[in-house]
């Protein structure tokens, strides 16, 4: 077993060897070696490691935030996708508005997001065409 970090005490090494029996591993076949150790690093090297770790964490957070922003931007263009799809079926459609609104319910005290779609047309649609759009 090769490990990195702070050195293990003899008691910790013995504990690992004893626990290996629970996994049917012969303790005689286990060799414990110190890999990377932080005890030999200077304060500036330790600070550098901490700063690199912080940069990695900040990059991960930045990527998550960028993903949220991309999702919000994509939602803004959802009305355009709806318009293009409906326009191909109903050429008399001239405009489509898509938005989301918060709906507050007094009886359940809950808030839910409701999509709102408003469609403008050049010519009158018959009832079956209107029903197709609603479905």
Image (tube, rainbow, N blue to C red):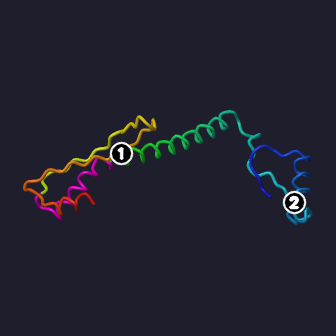
Asked whether residue 58 is drawn in magenta, I would say no
Asked whether residue 81 is drawn in magenta, I would say yes
Q: Whole-Å distance between the Cαs marked 2 and 1? A: 51 Å
Left or right for 23, reference 108: right
Chain-order first, disc 2 or disc 1: 2
Q: Residue at x 88, y 56 (%)?
A: 19
Where's residue 34, x and y in %?
Answer: 80, 51
Where's residue 39, x and y in %?
Answer: 77, 40
Q: Residue furthest front?
A: 107
Disc 2 on helix, strand or loop?
Answer: helix
Disc 1 on helix, strand or loop?
Answer: helix
Question: In the rendered structure, which segment of residues is drawn in magenta?
Answer: 74-92
Camera-side residue of 127 and 80: 127
Q: Residue at x 55, y 42 (%)?
A: 57
Which mark, residue 72?
A: 1
* Residue corresponding to mark 2: 20
Where's residue 60, x and y in %?
Answer: 51, 45
Say if 64 sits above or below 30 in the image: above
């Amino acid at each position: 077993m090769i490990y990195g970090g702070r050195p293990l005490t003899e008691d910790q090494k013995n504990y690992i060897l004893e626990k290996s029996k629970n996994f049917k591993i012969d303790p005689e076949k286990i060799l414990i070696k110190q890999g990377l150790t932080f005890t030999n690093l200077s304060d500036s090297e330790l600070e550098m490691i901490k700063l690199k770790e912080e940069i990695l964490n900040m990059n991960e957070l930045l990527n998550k935030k960028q993903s949220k922003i991309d999702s919000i931007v994509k939602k803004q263009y959802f009305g355009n996708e709806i318009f293009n799809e409906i326009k191909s079926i109903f050429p008399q459609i001239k405009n489509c508005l898509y938005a989301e609104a918060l709906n507050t319910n007094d009886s359940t005290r809950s808030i839910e997001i409701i999509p709102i779609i408003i469609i403008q047309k050049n010519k009158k649609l018959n009832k079956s065409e209107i029903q197709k759009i609603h479905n």
